[in-house]
Amino acid sequence: DWRVDFLVPASREWTTWSSRNRKAMKQQEFAEFLEDNEPDIAQPGGAALLDIALNFQASITGNFVSAKRLQDGSSQLVWNSSTEQGQIRLPETMQLAIPVFERGAPRELTARLRYRVKDGDLSIWYELVRPHKVLEDEFQNAWDFISAKTDVTILLGAPE
């Protein structure tokens, strides 16, 4: 005879990190993002990562390699390029500890750190590792909590 819809609101932290997922940022923009969200970084530590982001340097070197065959007149031209980091290395990953839903407990979430140098500009970003699984787990936790506190049957979805 009745129905209750409960839309679990995402936390501000989850919204902040997921909205910038896989979006390249200039070095200063990335550093400012880290500074604003430093409390969410569990490993390698927000201050340490911010220092790395501010002082990170990368460059691209490249050369052409040409090979010619006199026998058949064929040639091969290859461009070899490599990216080199300066003395400060960007870690491969960082660990976040953020709540998924409002008022939820912080959850560990891994993010891969990526960078590219293009036309002399350094871009840095992060890629959340399987964020959908963290969402599924937290949704199940909320479902289990509601089930334990009530004596109603919970249905997923809308009636047809």
Image (cartoon, helix red, strand yellow):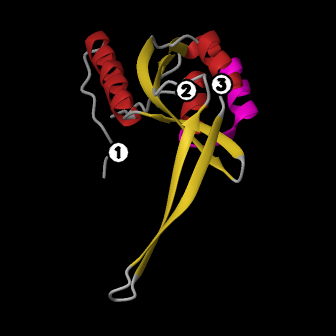
Q: In this view, does 103 lie above or below 60?
A: above
- Residue under circle 1? 158
Q: Which of marks 1 and 2 is in front?
A: 2
Dot 1 amino acid type? Ala
Indicate left or right for 51 with 107 as reference: right
Q: Who's the residue at 63% across and 15% down the image?
A: 38
Instruction: Identify the residue under disc 3.
Output: 53
- Residue at image x 32%, y 14%? 145
Label 1, residues with CA under 10 Å away: few <14, some 14-19, many ≥20? few
Q: What residue type is labelled 3?
A: Ala
Q: How crowded is mark 2: few (under 14 residues within 10 Å), some or many (20 or more)?
A: many
- Secondary element type, mark 1: loop
Q: Give the magenta-colored segment's residue range.
A: 20-36
Image height of 82 relative to 97, above or below: below
Say if 48 sits above or below 143 in the image.
Answer: above
Instruction: Give me the C-alpha separation between circle 2 and circle 3.
Output: 7 Å
* Rendering coords of residue 56 (x, y %): 65, 27
Image quadrant assignment for residue 48: top right
Label ID, residue 109:
none
Give the CA separation, mark 3 to mark 1: 46 Å
Q: Does the magenta stretch include residue 65?
A: no
Comparing 119 with 11, the one in front is 119
Read off the residue under disc 2. Answer: 90
**Image-based side of 55 in relation to 107, left or right:** right
- Of callouts 2 and 3, which one flags the residue occurring earlier in the amino acid sequence? 3
Q: Pinpoint residue 119: horizontal percent, then vertical percent.
A: 70, 54
Quarter of the picture holding the N terminus: top left
Q: Earlier in the sequence, mark 1 or mark 2?
A: 2
Q: What element carries label 3?
A: helix
Q: Do the residues labelled 2 and 3 touch (CB within 8 Å)?
A: yes
